[in-house]
Structure formats: structure tokens, C-alpha cells
Amino acid sequence: MSEIFYLSRKNYEKLREDLDNLKKTKAKLSEEIGEAARQGDLKENAEYHAAKEKQAETLAKINELEIKLRNIRITDDINVDKTEARIGATVIIEDLADGERTEYTLVGSMESNPDKGLLSVKAPIAVALLGKKEGEIFELVLPRVKRKYKLVKLEYK
């Protein structure tokens, strides 16, 4: 069974646009290959071989995107309990050891970018946070780390 990917509508539309652009690139490459083939001896035709290689890469990317797009669930459409931390929630958590606060938006793995505050729901801290309500304390337990956090703020934008 294929992996399910969670993605915002905005990023889903961007993937669709990327797929359309790749398909246009594929069509141009087919023309280039046809033109190169008309030039004669294909064994020593560098343009032909470069275009064929680029076409293979493009076809692989198209296939990968089509598989992902078939298996995407748009987070904007998911009906979740908005009183709990779930995918799509923006949270502020506080490290109870040092009082440091961090804001994250819980996203699917394709959108994850912790430097920008986008945390995959598969990340250990997100797994510990899922299902928690505002004000609740939770614990992150890793092989070398055991920390307590408080879910300070929870909202869905």
C-alpha cells in the first residue's frame, strides 16, 4: 500500500503546477529528441543522448509526483477536534526546564521545515504533542533526553 501524504491546499496546488510544467518539459524534450534523431548517426550525437537522459529524469519525476498526488490528503479538508493538537494546528509549547517557548505548525512530512516552524507530525516532539489540549503538560522521551513541555497555545488558522 502506498504512503499517505498530508499537504496544505496551497502546496497541493503547487505540486499540480510542478507536474504540469514537467509535462511541458517532457513534450519539449520529445521534440528535441526527434530533431536530434533526424540529424543522423545517433551513436555520436551528444545532443540526442543528453535529451534522452533528461527525458528519463523528467519521466521519473513525473511518475513520482503522480504517485504522491494520488495519495495526498489535503489538511485543510480534514475534520479534526480543534480542541486538541492535530495536523494543521499551530501551537506554542514551553520547555518546563528552561521556560523557552517555541511555535510550530503541525504538518505532513512533505511540508516539514523545522527552521520555518513547520513540524512534521512524525517528529518525536509532535508525536508526544498530538492529542494534547491547551494547558496540558506532556513528556518527550528519547534515548538521551527526557523533557517536559506545556502546550501553552493551540489554534487552527
Image: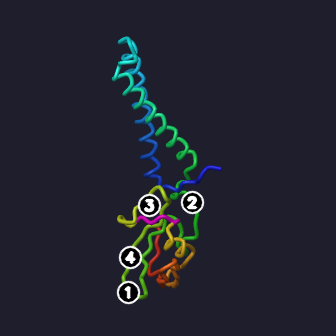
Q: Secondary structure at mark 2?
A: loop
N-terminal-most mark, 2 or 3: 2
Q: Which residues are magenta?
A: 118-122
Rounded to the nearest whole Å, what is the CA distance between mark 4 and mark 3? 16 Å
Instruction: Name the residue that disc number 2 marks.
Output: 78
Calculate the distance from the C-alpha at mark 2 to the C-alpha at mark 1: 33 Å
Residue 46 lies, in percent from the top left, at: 34, 23
User: In the rendered view of the protein, which quadrant contains the C terminus?
Assistant: bottom left
Q: Residue at x 42, y 35 (%)?
A: 22
Q: Quadrant of residue 77?
A: bottom right
Residue at the spot x=37%, y=80% of the render? 101
Looking at the rendered structure, the kind of residue marked 3 is Ser
Q: Residue furthest bottom?
A: 97
Q: Which mark is residue 102?
A: 4
Farthest residue, direction front: 43
Residue 155 image offset from top left, x and y in percent: 46, 72
Q: Secondary structure at mark 4?
A: strand
Q: Main secondary structure of the magenta part?
A: strand
Report x, y in % for residue 30: 42, 23
Residue beneath label 1, please? 99
Task: Quickly name the residue at label 3.
Answer: 112
Is 91 or 59 nearer to us in this picture? 59
The vertical placement of 153 against 68, above or below, is below
The numbered mark, 2 or 1, whose residue comes first in the sequence reads: 2
Indicate which label's residue lies in the foreground, 2 or 1: 1
- Do the numbered discs 2 and 1 sit on residues whose CB atoms are within 8 Å? no
